[in-house]
Image (spheres, helix red, strand yellow):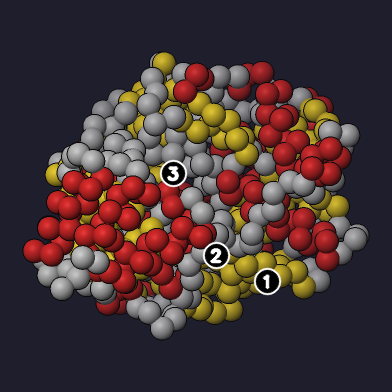
Amino acid sequence: MKILVTVTEVAIADDEFEIDGTSIDDTYLTFDLNEWDTYAIEEAVQLQEADDEIEVVTATVGPERVEETIRTALAKGADRAVRVWDDALDGETMIDPSRKAQLLAGVVEDEQPDLVLSGVQSGDVSLGATGVALAEQVGFEWGAVVNQLDLDGDTAKVHRELEGGVEERTEIELPAVLTIQTGINEPRYASLRGIRQAQSKPLDVNSPADLGVELAESSLALTDLVVPESESDTDLFEGAPEETAGELAALLKERGVGA
Amino acid sequence: MSDVLAIAEHRRGELRDVSYELITAGQELASSTDGNLHVAVISGPVEEYASDLDRPGVDQIHTVENGEEFNHDIYTQVAAQLADAVDAQHILTGNTVNGLDFAPALAERLGLPLVTDAVALDTDDGLSVVRELYGGKTEATIDVDTDRALVTTRPGEWPQADGTGDAVIEPFEADIDESTVRSTVTGFEEVGTGDVDISDADVLVSVGRGIEDEENIELIEELADALGATVSASRPIVDNGWLPPDRQVGQSGKKVSPEIYIAIGISGAVQHVAGMKGSDTIIAINDDPSAPIYDIADYGIVDDLFDVVPALIEQFSQ
């Protein structure tokens, strides 16, 4: 059995930043492995630990820079990695999820996995659409926002985390794409041994042409990026912690708290 | 003129609030182009749902009887057929867990662009959609350069349509290929039904990522004890297993509205705010003055929680 995990790198903006055109200037960004994807990797690695026959491959849409992040995923236990990129996407702040899915679909056609795990969303763009779009493109079944997964032959028995503390139990036929929610497991830290091994694990780089993909034109254009105006009218207590805590305590006591 | 199709959402016998918000958003879009607003309701007691969805401005409601609950394979097929049958230019559904379970597939099937999690829509010069980027720190405008598009709307961003309308309600005969239905919903489970019901508490001391370490949770428990309050948490604390799921406030956890809500080390992501914005008085302790929690907090202390919380405990132990 082969599990493909989609892994993306996200840009995390500093508390203070400046906007340059329609993106945040790189100097204010830190790049990291997407939080949701750490849970997807962990889920795949746990399945693999329970069954030696399972191979775990990561797939990433991103430029050369993201290879460091891909190595992090390999260090956590994935066997090998595939990266795909089209220079036409250079500098796009928000890649149309359908186009991203197209590139990933090329990898799926090439690798023929039984199961694809992807994060529910990326922490920066947060479209939450790539996984399900990918499933539809490759003709796989799917399930979004999965927070429990058990494999039973050709079926994935999952819980989908709905709103308001309700979970839906669903049975999904494989092959399938599941989007993984945070909290489904406890992602491990990469061990030193894992980090060392990751350096020598295969990382294949593909162009869309290598995968037989002709990238569609995007119908979406990011035309403006602003910092939303703060609606804050918070009454701030100012001063040393003893003073601010004192003022807050007075307010709380006035409301009958702690009496 | 462009027609709008809004796809309603329901669960376990009840329409969800976002359905009425979709009607408001759909009306805005339809009226700005003199188009019609169509509403679709799929599965469950559709006749009953249809009469609830009949609000002013809705022109037609299409009911599709098929099973009781949401199934993405059914929704995708039916919505694709209906969108073509009514020639909808703009298709709307909620940016919810179920919305995101079928909208991307529907967009692919119809060959349409999809923009998720919209907070505002504009049709002055073609469709443009406002949504957040960079984890909520910025707002982006996205222009859609096709005549037809699919958009999911963020829950709580549009007011719910109310009143009674005069829509034409009629069944839509969808041609459903059962062989492509490869997922089955087998039931539901309530999570987090422990001993403590945080939605009953008058005072909540709520802890978030800023607490940094599991062992620091004790500090928050100590404060809650001193105040006679109940401890709750934002999602990352529960994901890490530092507090049980019945303590989680937010979209996927509990909705709370205590008299006093003290948010400690909580940035105030939209999913969290959705669960606590109804609190009477909101107090934030967070050292980042730009944290979105300050958009809704009544009182705040912009300082290190590890300095403020012990000082506050001290105030109540004298």
Q: Can residue B275 be seen in this snapshot?
A: yes
To which residue does mark 2 refer?
Answer: B241
Horizontally, is B85 left or right of A212 in the view?
Answer: left
Using a 10 Å C-alpha cutoff, classify the residue at mark 2 as few (fewer than 14 neighbours), some (14 to 19) or many (20 or more). some
Label 3–label 2 contact, CB within 8 A? no
Inspect the image, locate mark 3, and give the three-letter code of the amino acid beneath it: Thr
Label placed on residue A157: 1
Residue found 75% across the figure and 69% down from its top: A151
What residue is rendered at 58% in x and 46% in y? A35
| Residue density around tag 3, few if under 14, some if 14–19, many if 20 or more, within 10 Å | many
**Residue B252 visible in the picture:** no
Amino acid on which the number 2 mark rests in the picture: Gly
Residue at 76% across, 25% down: A207
Q: Are marks 1 and 2 on the same chain?
A: no
Q: CA distance from mark 3 to mark 2?
A: 30 Å
- Rounded to the nearest angstrom, the CA distance separating label 1 from label 3 is 27 Å
Mark closer to the chain start, 3 or 2: 3
Spatial CA distance of label 1 from label 2 is 23 Å
In depth, the one of A245 and A44 nearer the eye is A245
Q: Chain of mark 1?
A: A
Q: Nearer the viewer, mark 1 or mark 3?
A: 1
Question: On the image, which quarter does residue A15 sit in?
Answer: top left
For disc 3, the marked residue is B116
Residue lying farthest to the bottom in this orientation: B195
Going by the picture, which residue comes out furthest to the left? A254
Q: Position of residue A258 (x, y in %)?
A: 19, 70
Task: Tell me residue B76's x, y (percent).
Answer: 53, 57
Indicate the quadrant containing the C terminus of chain B: top left, top right, bottom left or bottom right.
Answer: bottom left
Which residue is at 53% across, 72% downward? A168
* CB atoms of marks 1 and 3 within 8 Å: no
